[in-house]
Amino acid sequence: MPIDPYVLLLLGTVCLAALLPARDTAADVASGASTAAIAFLFFLYGARLSTREAVDGLRHWRLHATVLVCTFVIFPVLGLAARGLVPVLLTHPLYQGFLFLTLVPSTIQSSIAFTSIARGNVPAAICAGSFSSLVGIVLTPLLAAALLGNSGGGFSADSIVKIVLQLLVPFVAGQLLRPWIGGFVARHKKILGLVDRGSILLVVYTAFSEGMVRGIWHQVSAVRLAGLLAVEAVLLAVMLLLTWYGAKALGFGRGDRIAIQFAGSKKSLASGLPMASVLFGAHASLAVLPLMLFHQMQLMVCAVIAKRRAHDPEAQDTAEPPAAPAAESRPAVGTGTLRR
């Protein structure tokens, strides 16, 4: 169960923010740079998305609808149910971050990778993750405004407008310019991948710097973190079981069930971080902590599941062969270049 190297970079960024947080003018500069980086990040996501792939994927609408229901209905319901754990296991700020975790869209790249390893329906995983990311740009802030209200630290109509301007508008601009810049983006995806990662690291540094300056981290203890990890482990286990056996009850074949399990049980760190920085403001550092922990947990657990699924007796006969090249050439909408 490997640790994603990028998670180590994220943790290093958190440590840097704890030791050398941005203050005063430096904080203003970091905040402005973070805003610009997020906009550029989603512009690149738009430039990478193949419109033909998205249209072709609509033909498998039952699978995509199932993933969307898991991501934006069942996950939030479980998040609301966890309200009863406050203050026994979770503090109120940690619960707010946990609830926000349940509202963000699914991942793409790791869903594709794990589906491929498990010999599942890779094209379905590509389209399901893409649709989830697109829907999440609009639906996640709306759900956050409805379920978290002002307790999140700054939810309002202005917050939703800011999300649209900072995420959706650049994404649409990237789509419109794709005929002219799509080839350039594809040829330089490794270099632009560094921009993806750097943008997210900058968002993390800005959010955690502000949290340090405001003393927010004094609210978290080791016991509370352990409680958070336990709650997230239960959440992940429930979603993995529900997506696998629920998809079977709905009549999906093995390949589709694998795609549903991996796309419907995971949450996107790359999409969630920028949204949290806009919606939570000064409280963003605590808001993204549950998401960062869940991100690593889902990678470790799903890596084990994918390898075991690959050795299922029916894998050779009923599943599509691994399509790693398709996953690698696939534009990473809402994921940056994180290995999820």
Image (cartoon, rainbow, N blue to C red):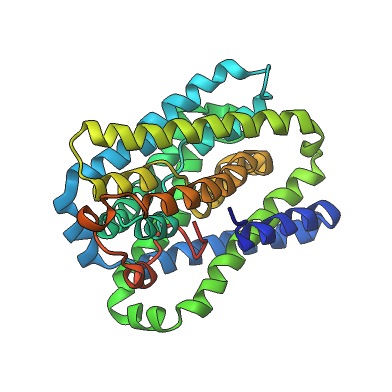
Q: Residue at x 58, y 66 (%)?
A: 197
Residue 123 against residue 92 in the figure, above or below: below
* Along the viewing direction, whichever of 133 and 146 lies nearer the viewer: 133
Left/right of residue 253 with respect to residue 21 in the rendered view: left
Q: Residue furthest right?
A: 19
* Along the viewing direction, whichever of 171 and 81 lies nearer the viewer: 81
Left/right of residue 15 with respect to residue 48 in the rendered view: right
Q: Quadrant of residue 287?
A: top right
Q: Position of residue 156 (x, y in %)?
A: 50, 35
Left/right of residue 199 with respect to residue 242 in the rendered view: right
Q: Position of residue 141 (x, y in %)?
A: 45, 40
Q: Position of residue 286 (x, y in %)?
A: 67, 39
* Along the viewing direction, whichever of 232 and 318 lies nearer the viewer: 318
Q: Position of residue 200 (x, y in %)?
A: 59, 60
Q: Is residue 174 visible?
A: no
Q: Residue at x 17, y 60 (%)?
A: 56
* Along the viewing direction, whichever of 40 and 195 lies nearer the viewer: 195
Q: Quadrant of residue 230?
A: top right
Q: Residue at x 65, y 42 (%)?
A: 289
Left/right of residue 71 with respect to residue 231 in the rendered view: left
Q: Residue furthest front?
A: 313
Q: Residue at x 70, y 56 (%)?
A: 205
Q: Quadrant of residue 26?
A: bottom right
Q: Is residue 13 visible?
A: yes
Residue 62 against residue 59 in the figure, above or below: above
Q: How many tags in the picture?
A: 0
Residue 19 against residue 278 in the figure, above or below: below
